[in-house]
Amino acid sequence: MHRPLAFLVTVLLIASGAAALASDVPRPDDLRAMKAEYRRSAPRIADNPALVALGRTLFFDPVISASGKTACASCHRPELAWADDVARSMGDSGRLTERRVQTLLGIGHARPPFDWDGRHATLEAQAVSSIGTGSMSMFATPHEMRVDDIVARLRRSDSYAAAFARAMPGQPINLDNVVIALAAFERTIEPGDAPFDRWIAGDETAIPDAAKRGFVVFNKQGNCVGCHRGWRFTDDQFHDIGISNKDPGRGRERKDDPFAQFAFKTPTLRSVALRPPYMHDGSLKTLRDVVDHYVKGGIDRPSRSPMMRPVDLTEDERKDLVAFLRTLTGE
Ligand code: HEC
Ligand code: HEC
């Protein structure tokens, strides 16, 4: 080939290559509409700070378990995005929980019902169950502790007497008021500010280009947004995404609802990178495993969500999706 011509062809090739690369990075303008869906809600302002303070103390205090050794925070660990790092956690009775611990991040914004299977209508009812019969599980211990014993312990404590008096003047120390305080505290557990939030707010340097491409995959090719919607990345609904055959999930109570079988509440994806293993049974170890699950589409059965068809993602798109999920970790 002619020298100058060869040079020109090379220049053209490089230029078109650069153009293709540049268009791989989604441009701010193209993304404006998509990004608008992810602006954070204002944090919930507690109208009674003394009640929140009491709830916080109770949440971290093993005094509300039969053995006196298990606190809510033993399983909902703040440094692990208020979840745990195992598929099943050790309950106060020494037995393992049936399912993986759920994160409490942003729970004040969540729509009820609560738990993976939605068996509790309010946070207060959920807390009664955690203390009374569930994970704190005093009835399963050798001493058969009763809620009354726990309330008696609190009544014997001068500092709790003072804290209850500040939070709920003139009200008795009883289980109802314990769970009102716990729930008031839980509602203040806000997801920390994440690189993703700074990007949404306009800082283009806050997240890498791979994550920006992953955000597009999340919203388009992957249709993750079908269920992980809005700034908390959840629709607060229940879906069967084809994980396992063992646990009927929401179907345990709703036997006649075909779509409730094997359905679990869509988890928030806030700080998701901090809290493997994933899913209600902790069966997926890494975010890459999760993405590969969605590519395959999970167990095909009548209850599986119509939104769960295998998604055809390239190797690069899968990596970008994981890079995106990593930008949701709050401080
Ligand atoms: C032994 C571990 C353990 C302890 C202790 C524990 N939890 Fe949990 N928590 C879990 C598990 C596991 C789940 C999921 C339960 C399910 O769906 O079956 C859960 C779920 C929840 C949920 C529902 C979250 C959602 O998104 O719906 C809330 C709220 C909660 N716990 C609050 C508490 C409070 C308050 C305490 C203390 C009184 C507590 N937990 C103690 C393990 C624990
Ligand atoms: C049909 C609704 C639906 C769609 C579509 C969907 N998800 Fe999910 N996602 C869920 C539900 C429900 C769970 C919990 C399932 C379980 O535990 O069995 C979940 C769990 C997860 C988890 C684990 C979180 C945790 O705390 O364990 C991640 C990560 C995740 N999804 C990411 C994605 C990505 C990425 C996509 C797109 C490729 C996607 N999801 C598409 C409903 C959906």
Image (tube, helix red, strand yellow):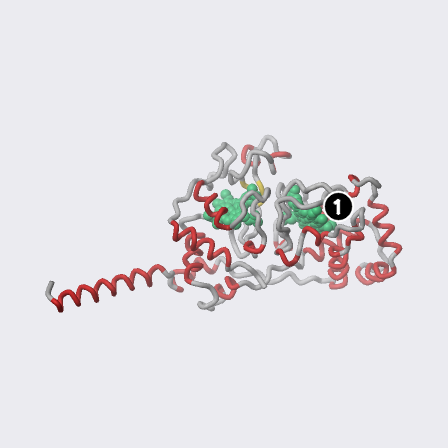
Residue drawn 49% across and 46% down? 289
Q: Percent position (x, y) of residue 74?
A: 71, 52
Q: In the picture, residue 118 is in which quadrant?
A: top right
Asked if residue 230 shows in the view, the reply is: yes
Residue drawn 44% across and 48% down? 223
Q: Is residue 264 above or below residue 315?
A: above
Residue sticking out furthest to the top: 256
Q: Quadrant of the C terminus?
A: bottom right
Q: Percent position (x, y) of residue 134?
A: 73, 42
The answer to whether residue 70 is left or right of residue 10 is right
The residue that label 1 is drawn on is 92
The answer to whether residue 185 is left or right of residue 40 is right
Q: Quadrant of the N terminus?
A: bottom left
Q: Is residue 161 above or below residue 237?
A: below
Q: Is residue 75 above or below residue 168?
A: above
Residue drawn 74% across and 64% down? 49
Residue drawn 70% across and 45% down? 90
The amino acid type found where label 1 is placed reads Asp
The answer to whether residue 306 is left or right of residue 76 is left
Q: How many marks?
A: 1
- Check mark 1 vs ligand 1: CB closer than 8 Å? yes or no: yes
Q: Percent position (x, y) of residue 213?
A: 41, 57
Of residues 75 and 148, the one nearer the viewer is 75
